[in-house]
């Protein structure tokens, strides 16, 4: 059954869009049963994973580690929440890469937002960024939550559209702290194009792109650690926008296989199995496990909207610094929505950039997949989900927060 399923779901890295065969439709109809309840099927995939590792160990030696990196906080959540690591042979190591937008939002943007909130500019934010700590305090506040507690003008919203509706009635200046990856960017671009943003609302963009960060993290792992990354588990929702193509290019450039994965536990198990198969065949390129959502070219309308409003630029990542062509800035044609211009806010460049990691913490290493949260001396001592010290402890997608709540290496056997 597992092989039949794999044939129906995975598509090779070719320029052809995935075909919608009857087999595919049949499986999509029973997706709920398959993904949520099918323990027998999970067992079959697990057995196959162990068999493939046995074959690979014969080639590479019993001590060889297959290190796979994910680039999505939700993948890490699924991995930890469902105990996926405990189902795998010891030769497989799953590491979390820079896949949480809150964790990588630079401190200077939080500091700008806090400062504006004290100048009676209403700052709208998502709930997780509300508690994101800055490195430097601004008028005594080190997060938007602390700013609000001290009288800052901060409003937590569930979506950008909610902020648009509210600011329309508010009439005074307001700013939206626009964090996110490729998945979130169209949500800002489409209202800009359609003139749905009220004249009193500006964007403070912290939009970042995942494939350049994935390349950076993998190169850093190569430089700094003994073992390289052997496979990429690429983010399904980001790829719904970008398509599979950029991951295929990256995979071929770095010469390691990539599987774009969905977020259910069986999605991840299937993606790990497929990476092992690709390694055994010495294959590079991308395969799409999350075929029910991801196409080769992505969501062309959303990509066009992003390209219309934003420019790809070298951008700073929290604790890491600048990564080439890894962020989005508001284009000049839409500069009337740009908070940097409206409020003459400073923007660092490579020369003026100063490290914004917290002294003594392991946030940068955790973000790059070079350390586990438990290796940080602050983990669950002075840094915990109710009182986060570093950025990875804030969001439900942050690696430290996930490990703190569910236990990163909790074994089903123990
Ligand atoms: Fe950073 Fe806290 Fe995680 Fe340490 S435990 S790496 S300080 S978020």
Image (tube, helix red, strand yellow):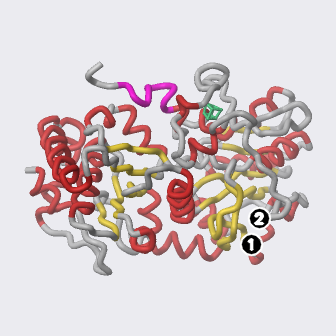
Q: Nearer the viewer, residue 262 or 64?
A: 64
Marks 2 and 1 sit apart, C-alpha to C-alpha, by 6 Å
Q: Is residue 311 above or below residue 158?
A: below
Q: Is residue 183 visible?
A: no
The mark total stands at 2
Q: Is residue 242 above or below residue 45?
A: below
32 displayed left or right of 2: right
- Dot 2 crowding, Cα within 10 Å, few <14, some 14–19, many 20+: many
Residue 18, quarter of picture: bottom left
Residue 81, quarter of picture: top left
Quarter holding ligand 1: top right
Span of residues in magenta: 402-410
**Is residue 370 highlighted in magenta?**
no
Residue 138 place in picture, x, y as percent = 88, 38
Q: Secondary structure at mark 1?
A: helix
Q: Is residue 65 above or below residue 232?
A: above
The residue where tag 2 is placed is 337
Q: Nearer the viewer, residue 245 or 381?
A: 381
Residue 372 place in picture, x, y as percent = 51, 36
Q: Secondary structure at mark 2?
A: helix
Q: Is residue 308 visible?
A: yes
The residue where tag 1 is placed is 334
């Amino acid at each position: 059954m597992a092989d039949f399923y794999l044939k129906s779901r995975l598509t090779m890295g070719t320029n052809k869009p995935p075909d919608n065969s009857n087999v595919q439709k049949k499986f999509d109809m029973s997706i709920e049963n398959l993904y949520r309840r099918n323990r027998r099927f999970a067992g079959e995939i697990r057995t196959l994973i162990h068999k493939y590792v046995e074959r690979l160990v014969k080639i590479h030696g019993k001590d060889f580690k297959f290190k796979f990196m994910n680039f999505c906080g939700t993948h890490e959540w699924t991995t930890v929440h469902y105990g996926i690591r405990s189902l795998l042979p010891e030769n497989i190591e799953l590491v979390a890469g820079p896949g949480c937008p809150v964790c990588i939002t630079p401190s200077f943007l939080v500091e700008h937002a806090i400062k504006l909130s004290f100048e009676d500019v209403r700052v709208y934010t998502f709930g997780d960024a509300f508690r994101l700590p800055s490195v430097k305090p601004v008028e005594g506040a080190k997060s938007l939550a602390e700013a609000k507690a001290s009288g800052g003008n901060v409003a937590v919203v569930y979506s950008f559209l909610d902020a648009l509706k509210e600011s329309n009635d508010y009439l005074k200046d307001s700013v939206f702290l626009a964090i996110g990856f490729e998945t979130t960017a169209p949500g800002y671009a489409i209202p800009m194009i359609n003139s749905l943003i009220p004249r009193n609302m500006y964007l403070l963009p912290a939009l970042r792109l995942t494939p350049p960060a994935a390349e950076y993290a993998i190169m850093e792992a190569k430089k700094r650690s003994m073992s390289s990354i052997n496979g990429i588990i690429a983010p399904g929702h980001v790829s719904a926008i970008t398509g599979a193509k950029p991951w295929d290019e990256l995979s071929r450039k770095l010469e390691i296989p990539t599987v774009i994965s969905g977020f259910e536990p069986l999605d991840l198990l299937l993606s790990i199995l497929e990476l092992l198969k690709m390694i055994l065949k010495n294959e590079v390129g991308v395969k799409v496990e999350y075929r029910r959502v991801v196409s080769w070219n992505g969501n062309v309308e959303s990509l066009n909207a992003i390209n219309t409003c934003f420019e790809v630029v070298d951008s700073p990542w929290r604790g890491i610094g600048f990564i080439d062509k890894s962020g989005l800035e508001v284009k000049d044609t839409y500069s009337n929505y740009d908070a940097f211009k409206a409020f003459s806010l400073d923007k660092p460049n490579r020369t003026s950039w100063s490290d914004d990691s917290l002294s003594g913490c392991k946030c940068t290493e955790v973000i790059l997949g070079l350390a586990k949260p438990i290796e940080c001396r602050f983990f669950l001592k002075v840094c915990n989900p109710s009182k986060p010290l570093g950025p990875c402890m804030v969001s439900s997608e942050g690696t430290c927060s996930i490990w703190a709540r569910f236990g990163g290496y909790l074994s089903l056997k123990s």
